[in-house]
Image (tube, grey):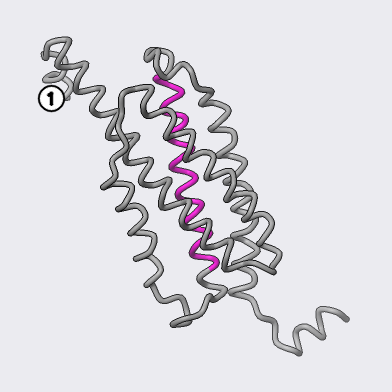
Amino acid sequence: MRATFRIRSWSASRRSHFVASALHIYLQDHLAGATFGLELVQRCRRNNEGTEFAEPLAELTVEIAEDRQTLRRIMPDVGADVSRTKVAAGWTLEKIRRLKPNGGLFEYTPLARVVELESLAIGIAGKRAMWHALDDVASSEDRLGLHDFSRLAERADDQLSRVEVLRLDAARTAFFHPSPERRGRASA
């Protein structure tokens, strides 16, 4: 409440600068997250070549790359510069994330697949939230009115649904290994 009061008491130009700056930071942060997500889905796709996960991950990779490019096109519309530092941080953090042990020191494991897909789902949910927020403010920010944020949010919903199917399949693979006796009983 106190912060709102202070902002309201600012001059119109100061308030406008603060709001624009906040939007620029928000978009820069999401671009860093999109960089992380793109690196993650590309790695996940590479690690799943030759599996039933390969084709859906290839489709998601294309879409996530397109969404990242859409965000890059939106940024100049509102006067936001790309923060190379934040983009580099997103790229670097994805590489550091790989150091987390997932049941194998140097190999890709079923648990690693589950963790990657869960991380991807979290990123897509964040992207969906961003599209919804931008859609909400687009009615009062002319420069955002050029983009169909509701369509982008629907696409993120679809991506999230597809990742959830993959994640549950990966979890079954990682966490359920029936013994030979159980497999025999299951087929009987």
Q: Is residue 134 left or right of residue 150?
A: left
The front one of 119 and 82 is: 82
The front one of 9 and 55 is: 55
**What residue did someone put label 1 on?**
2
Q: Quadrant of the N terminus?
A: top left
Residue at the extreme bottom of the image, as rendered:
181
Q: Main secondary structure of the magenta part?
A: helix
Kindly identify the residue that appears in the image at 54 percent across and 31 percent down.
152
Q: Is residue 6 magenta?
A: no
The image position of residue 20, as x and y in percent, is 26, 23
Kindly identify the residue that appears in the image at 39 percent across and 20 percent down.
137
The image position of residue 85, as x and y in percent, is 26, 47
Q: Is residue 174 left or right of residue 187?
A: left
Instruction: Identify whether 17 is placed above or below 44.
Output: above
Kindly identify the residue that appears in the image at 19 percent across and 23 percent down.
18
Magenta range = 113-137
Query: For residue 11, what is the image quadrant?
Result: top left
Give the amino acid type for the residue marked by disc 1 in the picture.
Answer: Arg
Q: Secondary structure under badge 1?
A: helix
Residue at the extreme top of the image, as rendered:
12
The image position of residue 147, as x and y in percent, is 50, 22
The image position of residue 76, as x and y in percent, is 36, 26
Instruction: Identify whether 160 is placed above or below 2.
Output: below
Q: Is residue 132 magenta?
A: yes
Query: For residue 83, what is the image quadrant?
Result: top left
Q: Quadrant of the C terminus?
A: bottom right
Instruction: Identify whether 130 is placed above or below 180.
Output: above
Kindly identify the residue that appears in the image at 59 percent across and 33 percent down.
154
